[in-house]
Image: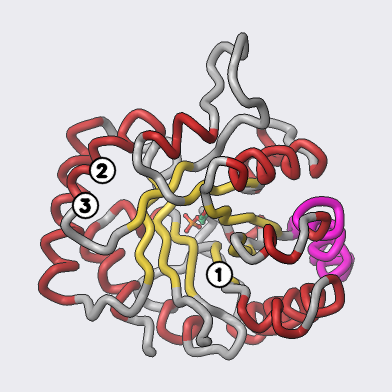
Amino acid sequence: MKRKKIVAGNWKMNGTYDDACKLTSEIVAMAKDELNGNTVVILAPPFPFIPTVNKLTEQTNIKISAQNCSSENSGAFTGEVSAAMIASCGAAYVIIGHSERRTIFKEQDDLLLKKVQMALANNLSVIFCIGETKEQREQAIHFKVAEEQLNNSIFKLSADEFSKCIIAYEPVWAIGTGLTATPAQAQEMHHYIRGCIAKSFTPQVAEQCSLLYGGSCNESNAAELFALEDIDGGLIGGASLKSRSFVNIIKSMKD
Ligand code: 13P
């Protein structure tokens, strides 16, 4: 079985309700006419917009993701959003461990593992983010950092649970900076990550796991990145907020 090719748009905390409707409608219109449907397209809007974005995309193959979920099931956790709530609003995925959650909200590996388990228990697939900071790359410890992030979290899952996870490699120094890992740097890290999965599980599990690149992936560099052997798609930030750019990125994916 071939690995799934995936292009996911992480809208982060941007836009209003009207902006979300306009962006979704534009993507749906373009997707209908221009996309061949072999790539899994995922939109990750802010929580309040999930039901509407889900409704607007229901005639398409587009899937919906949340950007985070609680590690708790339900109860007195003011401001939190549970995996069950997200699933009940029509989302099929949730992003967990984004570097902005790790750095700004101080989310650590053990909490992230709890979130992943909660997501899986509610039938959500997980887009799990890892990646090194600029300082860590300069110290040449980026492979070790990525492996530790995996060992301390999703590598503790069973192989069956892990098969519902997608990994997004997002070098922190490339997120929102306009800097992008070179194709060689991105392929090298993705290849290393696949090797770590093979070591922790089996080569077959590693072969099936989709690995996305994130970090200033845009319509100019997507084709080159997506053509690399171990890159199965992208997790797109800024460029996913412009319908034309996002659709061009999807079109960069070759079968
Ligand atoms: P940018 O594409 O804006 O660099 O963001 C990447 C990202 O963080 C996607 O999750």
Alpha carbons under labels 2 and 3: distance apart: 6 Å
Q: Earlier in the sequence, mark 1 or mark 3?
A: 3
Q: Is residue 172 above or below residue 6?
A: above
- The image shows residue 242 at horizontal and vertical percentages of 26, 56
Q: Is residue 249 magenta?
A: no
Residue at the image position 23 percent from the left and 59 percent from the top: 243
Who is closer to the viewer here, 160 or 81?
Answer: 160
Q: Is residue 148 magenta?
A: yes
Q: Main secondary structure of the magenta part?
A: helix
- The image shows residue 219 at horizontal and vertical percentages of 35, 73
Would you say residue 168 is visible in this rendering? Answer: no
- The image shows residue 157 at horizontal and vertical percentages of 77, 56
State if disc 3 and disc 1 touch (CB < 8 Å): no
Which residue position holds label 1? 212
State if disc 3 and disc 2 touch (CB < 8 Å): yes
The answer to whether 236 appears left or right of 134 in the picture is left
- The kind of residue on which mark 3 rests is Thr
Residue at the image position 67 percent from the left and 31 percent from the top: 71
Q: Is residue 222 above or below residue 141?
A: below
- The kind of residue on which mark 2 rests is Val
Which residue position holds label 2? 53
- Badge 2, how many Cα within 10 Å: few under 14, some, many 20+? many
Residue at the image position 16 percent from the left and 57 percent from the top: 59
- Say which quarter of the image contains residue 254: bottom left
Q: Which residues are magenta?
A: 132-154
**Disc 1: residue Cβ within 8 A of ligand 1's nearest atom:** no
- Badge 1, how many Cα within 10 Å: few under 14, some, many 20+? many
- The kind of residue on which mark 1 rests is Leu
Which residue position holds label 3? 57
Alpha carbons under labels 1 and 3: distance apart: 22 Å
The answer to whether 252 appears left or right of 105 in the picture is left
**Which mark lies nearer to you, 1 or 3?**
3
